Amino acid sequence: MNNLMRELRTERGWSQADLAAQLEVSRQTVNAIETGRYDPSLPLAFKIARLFERPIEAIFEAPSA
């Protein structure tokens, strides 16, 4: 799944560890989401959207077919 997490995180000057702490997940989870190797659960996606103050659809997008 394509996403804007890395861009949103760096705009705020947060490291992956900073973001992970706020989301209560591991830094490895943040890295896996940013690189598209892991799709977050729906509750985690909502948490990410709330943290970045954007709709889920503005952060995550399904890959083009």
Image (cartoon, helix red, strand yellow):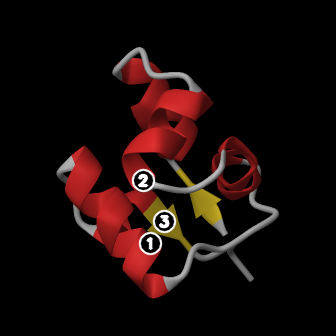
* Residue 58 x %, y %: 33, 60
Question: Sequence order check: which comes first, mark 2 or mark 1?
Answer: 2
Q: What is the residue that sits farthest to the right in this orientation?
A: 37
> Which residue carries the number 2 mark?
23
Q: Residue at x 60, y 76 (%)?
A: 62
Task: Kindly indicate the quadrant of the structure image that contains residue 27.
Answer: top right
Q: Residue at x 41, y 58 (%)?
A: 59
Secondary structure beneath dot 1 equals helix
Question: Sequence order check: which comes first, mark 2 or mark 3?
Answer: 2
Question: Sequence order check: which comes first, mark 3 or mark 1?
Answer: 1
* Residue 18 x %, y %: 48, 29
Residue type beneath disc 3: Phe
Q: Is residue 20 above or below residue 14?
A: below
Residue type beneath disc 1: Leu
* Residue 2 x %, y %: 63, 61
> Which residue carries the number 3 mark?
60
Q: Is residue 3 left or right of residue 58?
A: right
> Which residue carries the number 1 mark?
44
Q: Is residue 45 above or below residue 9?
A: below
Question: How would you rate the neighbour count of disc 1 (Cα within 10 Å): few for under 14, some for 14-19, many for 20 or more?
Answer: some
Q: Mark 2 or mark 3: which is in front?
A: 2
Q: Mark 3 or mark 1: which is in front?
A: 1
Contact between labelled residues 1 and 2, with CB atoms less than 8 Å apart: yes
| Quarter of the rendering occupied by the C terminus | bottom right
